Image: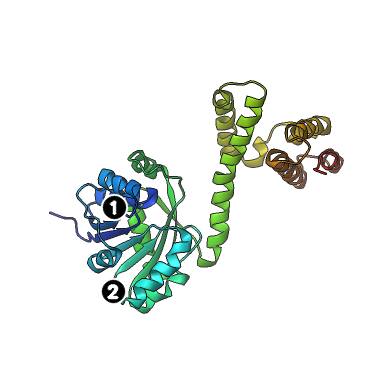
């Protein structure tokens, strides 16, 4: 016997996010009535995570579903929503949730105009598109945006997937998403750059060297914030910073490649934040700035 309040769920986009969230909703005993999958990879993902769920055309999914989950790229969301509105596909009372971090529910006016309920459910997690993501959801938060009366529905759906909902105001969505992208995406770039530098000096397995250091740094930063900062910038060691920058300039052949550019930008930001928080004296901040300016690309 099904639990009360179970929904027929349609998944539009069997990418890494859509397939995993569909599986999580299915585990909460909602019925996934259909999934759209165009590429071979998305079809395989749907077969693995949503076995037995029919692959349907998008309009057929919307027609059958009480909850439509739009898990498509940001730039595709607007045209998709508008196109379905022109076809008269949205239904009164239907729940329409998207997984974009950038958008809230304001741009879903065609959904609201049809009497459907717009929701924004963005998981603050990077996905692999495999079953291990279902376990990761248990330690994940979602940025949730909805009309005030509908917010409890959005929050309940997230809780049913095993995650924690955090309400984000409509106007705060771009800054919210920028924070996540800055922390997650740029971390990948920094790690890749550090690994490249270590390979340059003959370290064959840079991951083994960086792993313990970076994990400890991340844990300390999450627990203690900027008071966990260590290293030459935090010590005001301008000579070491200058030596670093010069070595990176040589690595890039004096052309100002992406590693030097990133190091200079992050070191300046670190010095500025350390100074504003009293971790460095003004003269130490100036010394770091001068060291960095001397190594700037020509």
Q: What colouring method underlies this structural image?
A: rainbow
Q: Quick check: marks 2 and 1 in contact, CB under 8 Å?
A: no
The image shows residue 162 at horizontal and vertical percentages of 34, 47
Towards the viewer: 96 or 294 = 294
Position above or below: 55 against 297? below
Q: Disc 1 marks which residue? A: 25
Residue farthest to the left, as pictured: 1
Towards the viewer: 199 or 107 = 199
* Snapshot quadrant of residue 66: bottom left
The image shows residue 138 at horizontal and vertical percentages of 37, 43
Answer left or right for 261 relative to 172.
Answer: right
Position above or below: 195 against 172? above
Query: SS at mark 1?
Result: helix
Cα distance between the residues tagged 2 and 1? 21 Å
Towards the viewer: 36 or 178 = 36
Answer left or right for 266 relative to 77.
Answer: right
Q: Residue at x 57, y 36 (%)?
A: 218
Number of residues whose C-alpha sits closer than 10 Å to that of mark 1, classed few (under 14), some (14–19) or many (20 or more): many
Q: Quadrant for the N terminus, please.
A: bottom left
The image shows residue 55 at horizontal and vertical percentages of 25, 55
Towards the viewer: 196 or 150 = 196
Q: Residue at x 47, y 65 (%)?
A: 104
* Dot in front, 2 or 1: 2
Specify the label residue 91 is tagged with: 2
Position above or below: 130 against 107? above
Which of the marked residues, 2 or 1, is nearer the chain's N terminus?
1
Q: Residue at x 27, y 62 (%)?
A: 57
């Amino acid at each position: 016997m099904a639990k009360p309040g179970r929904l027929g769920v349609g998944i539009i986009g069997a990418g890494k996010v859509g397939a995993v969230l569909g599986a999580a909703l299915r585990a909460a005993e909602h019925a996934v009535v259909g999934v759209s999958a165009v590429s071979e990879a998305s079809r395989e993902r749907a077969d693995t995570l949503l076995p037995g769920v029919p692959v349907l055309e998008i309009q057929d999914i919307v027609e059958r579903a009480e909850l439509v989950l739009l898990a498509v790229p940001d730039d595709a969301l607007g045209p998709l929503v508008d196109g379905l509105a022109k076809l008269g596909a949205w239904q009164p009372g239907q729940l329409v949730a998207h997984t974009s971090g950038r958008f809230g529910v304001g741009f879903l006016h065609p959904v609201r105009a049809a009497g459907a309920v717009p929701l924004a459910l963005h998981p603050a997690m990077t996905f692999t598109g495999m079953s291990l993501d279902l376990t990761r959801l248990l330690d994940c938060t979602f940025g949730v945006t909805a009309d005030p009366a509908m917010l409890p529905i959005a929050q309940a759906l997230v809780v049913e997937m095993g995650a924690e909902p955090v309400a984000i105001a409509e106007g705060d969505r771009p800054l919210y998403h920028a924070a996540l992208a800055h922390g997650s995406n740029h971390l990948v770039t920094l790690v890749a750059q550090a690994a490249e530098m270590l390979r340059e000096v003959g370290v064959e397995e840079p991951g083994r060297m960086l792993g313990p250091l970076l994990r400890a740094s991340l844990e300390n930063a999450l627990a203690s914030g900027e008071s966990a900062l260590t290293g030459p910038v935090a010590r005001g060691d301008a000579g070491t910073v200058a030596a670093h920058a010069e070595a990176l300039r040589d690595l890039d052949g004096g052309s100002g490649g992406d590693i030097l550019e990133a190091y200079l930008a992050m070191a300046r930001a670190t010095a500025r934040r350390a100074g504003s928080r009293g971790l460095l004296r003004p003269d130490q901040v100036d010394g770091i700035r001068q060291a960095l300016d001397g190594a700037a690309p020509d």
